[in-house]
Image (cartoon, rainbow, N blue to C red):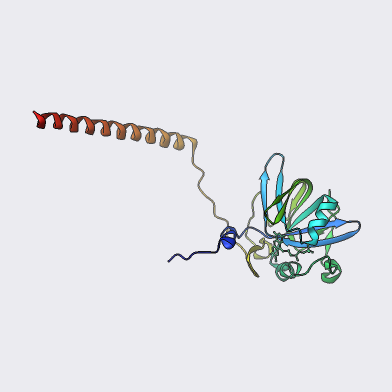
Amino acid sequence: MRHSIDDKDARRLLGGGPVALLTTSWRGNWNVMPLAFYTPLSIDPPLIGVAIHPGRHTHDMVRYSEEFALNIPTQELLHHCQYLGTVTGSELNKFDLTKLPTFRARRVEAPLLEGCVGWIECGIQDAYTVGDHTMYVGKVVAASAEQDAFDNNWLLTDPEEKPLHYLGVNYYATLGERLEARIPAVADIKRDIEAGAAELVDEEESAERKERQAEAKDREERG
Ligand SMILES: Cc1cc2nc3c(=O)[nH]c(=O)nc-3n(C[C@H](O)[C@H](O)[C@H](O)COP(=O)(O)O)c2cc1C
């Protein structure tokens, strides 16, 4: 049974990517907010788009400092995520309040968060107004990950080391297990292409044959 979804909620069907805690620093002040609207945009140069509503304190922190960091939390920061996304840095200092432990980033001033398994440091390359958000295009200047959590992919072995995913509202999840797909051999792909092409020729030939037979029958009937 299918049910329709409000256009504005269609984005939730694409949900499930790791949530990020976006940290910023400007003139000695730090801020942090959870971020679900991000996307890789380019591999070389490595660019990541982050969509931030102009109403967020983070929006101006990124605009002025021209940099940010993405921290990928684990379930240890589940309740922090929700809290940090409910209050604003324009009214209170989220770091004083939460006492979240941090460490220095390699290339940006924004602090990096403990209790996370991946960190991406970015400088701002561009900014575009996209609907009611600003899409900042960040160029990756440094990245690191917890070895037990990520080799060149998320390992998803230890529940404590799994990234936290955002489903919407106040729901989150972690992924089950990593599944490995079979990599098709080049020879198999070639064989499939050739077989497909041969099948196509066969189909065309049989269609032509049928047409000729129909024409011959038609002529016969007309005498
Ligand atoms: C899990 C989660 C994800 C969020 N993702 C975004 C996002 O991608 N872009 C955005 O502008 N706001 C997003 N928000 C809302 C901001 O995090 C929230 O408004 C926050 O309080 C802003 O803090 P600030 O004013 O200190 O920057 C999200 C909130 C939550 C809880």
Whether residue 66 is visible: yes
Horizontal side of 101 relative to 74 (left or right) equals: right
Q: Quadrant of the N terminus?
A: bottom left
**Residue 213: x percent and y percent?**
18, 31
Whether residue 151 is visible: no
Q: What residue occupies the far right of the structure in this picture?
A: 28
| Residue at horizontal 34 percent and vertical 35 percent from the top | 199
In what quadrant does ligand 1 lie?
Answer: bottom right
Task: Reply above or below: 114 against 215.
Answer: below
Q: Quadrant of the C terminus?
A: top left
Near-viewer residue (48 or 129): 129
| Residue at horizontal 64 percent and vertical 55 percent from the top | 154
Task: Reply above or below: 186 against 165.
Answer: above
Horizontal side of 204 relative to 178 (left or right) equals: left
**Residue 8: x percent and y percent?**
59, 61
Near-viewer residue (183 or 203): 203
**Residue 168: x percent and y percent?**
63, 66
**Residue 47: x percent and y percent?**
71, 45
| Residue at horizontal 10 percent and vertical 30 percent from the top | 222
Q: How many marks?
A: 0
| Residue at horizontal 80 percent and vertical 61 percent from the top | 57
In which quarter of the view is residue 174 placed?
Answer: bottom right
